[in-house]
Amino acid sequence: MPDMLAIGREILAAQGFSRLLGTEMTAYSPEGAELRLPLRPELLQQNGFAHGGVVSYLADNALTYAGGAALGIGVLTAEYKINYVRPGVGSALVARAEVLYAGKSLATCRCDVFSVLADGTEKLCATAQGTIAKVGG
Amino acid sequence: MPDMLAIGREILAAQGFSRLLGTEMTAYSPEGAELRLPLRPELLQQNGFAHGGVVSYLADNALTYAGGAALGIGVLTAEYKINYVRPGVGSALVARAEVLYAGKSLATCRCDVFSVLADGTEKLCATAQGTIAKVGG
Amino acid sequence: MPDMLAIGREILAAQGFSRLLGTEMTAYSPEGAELRLPLRPELLQQNGFAHGGVVSYLADNALTYAGGAALGIGVLTAEYKINYVRPGVGSALVARAEVLYAGKSLATCRCDVFSVLADGTEKLCATAQGTIAKVGG
Amino acid sequence: MPDMLAIGREILAAQGFSRLLGTEMTAYSPEGAELRLPLRPELLQQNGFAHGGVVSYLADNALTYAGGAALGIGVLTAEYKINYVRPGVGSALVARAEVLYAGKSLATCRCDVFSVLADGTEKLCATAQGTIAKVGG
């Protein structure tokens, strides 16, 4: 039985962009994926909040992992949509993605991104919904 | 009369994340915005293509600028949706965003992201559509 | 204290299109809205499933109601996105929408649409996410 | 060589819901699809504008046709997103959809929906972007 979390971390470590940002995978199972990204000045926009592109990146990546858990290795995000609801603040962002439905070649996934405050409490920052496709599917 | 491009570049320079990535603003007018991002290994994913999060970031940022051109300073991306159509490859990505409709407090914008190949030709990489909102609107 | 369900049903009855389709409002509270639409041949597509436009209509309408519960009377759906996951079948469709976050003039809402089978069990048919805006906001 | 418009109209005529609404197909080619829907009281909402569900239905249907022109018979809309920009008014709505990119099993399409005023001029009412999938793809 493969260790999903180990495989997920290996893929993450092979992404130059995820290394540049400092993303960590904190959970990966058939039910979904969780990514964590500690915030630092290089990840912010001009008002001191997490850049929308950082929030999107984290949601997109978590969605892809969730879809991969359902469809198998070799998937990509075909599309997704994200609503930003509160500024990304605090010590880290955490994204939790789950599969809503998976067919043979497409999976519909959902992801919530939370700001993790200094005291550990979480606030919803953004919510995303997307389609993951098997490559060559 | 304000120099829109200069203002846009100033805002971009104030975004730690855009500096980390190396984004350049190449056009900014009431008609829309153009951002350019030279590709390098730190911006790729495990297969050697631009990371989806990089493509999203560029689209999101260009959408916000386009909306700001219509609604005025002090806007944010409320939401957007992106379809990835081809891998991001080549020497750079370029995002071009325009306003489809602007009301008093919301603007609907569209953005295409292209891969710029070595010979300068462009290939559509992703297309996005989103809602920009005036802050406090 | 206003009877939300009565107000919601009054608005629904004033929508010519909802009367044409036969939509019923089965719940409406500050937490969200539930709409139910009995299926009949006039609501299907060429393969005998609920037409995607019927599913979308129900999701869109439920999203607007949910947003209205948070923002007050006088709202509209600014945008939404829907993923169809299974064909709409059975005796009826039911849409359940909730508010994920509401600010002063915008609310982010989510809606699941289910097929109601002959034995009363429900199957997820589609899932939607959208932005509701206060009119003139 | 098949007459695409004739095939498109045959499919439309087989959709109970499209007959209920009164949709006409006015163009269908490898480049895209055009649908037209005369407005009447049964298609409106409580303020006298075209119901959002009517606008969505038309966009969704046009997107599916556009995708089918690229992928072949046997497609469905996997997902789409729509931004409403102006109320649907006038004598009819017209939806024009085109293919932005088509792979083997997925196509990314775009659709604009216009209000057709009494003098024949058109005003953008909504814009949509979606993913069409080959059935069983």
Image: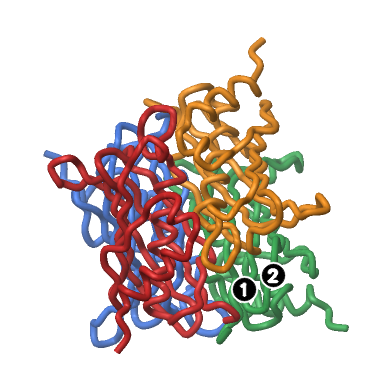
Chain colours: A green, B blue, C orange, D red
Q: Chain of mark 2?
A: A
Query: Residue at point 28% right, 59% down?
Result: B25
Residue closest to the eye, C29 or A93: C29
x, y percent for residue A107: 64, 69
Residue closest to the eye, C28 or C46: C46
Of all residues shown, which one is farthest toward the right?
Answer: A1
For disc 2, the marked residue is A102
Q: Label 1 near label 2: C-beta < 8 Å?
A: yes
Of all residues shown, which one is farthest toward the top?
Answer: C1
Residue closest to the eye, C22 or B5: C22
Q: CA distance from mark 2 to mark 1?
A: 6 Å
For disc 1, the marked residue is A106
Snapshot quadrant of residue D23: bottom left
Q: Chain of mark 1?
A: A
Query: Residue at point 49% right, 33% down?
Result: C106
Query: Residue at point 56% right, 48% down?
Result: C129
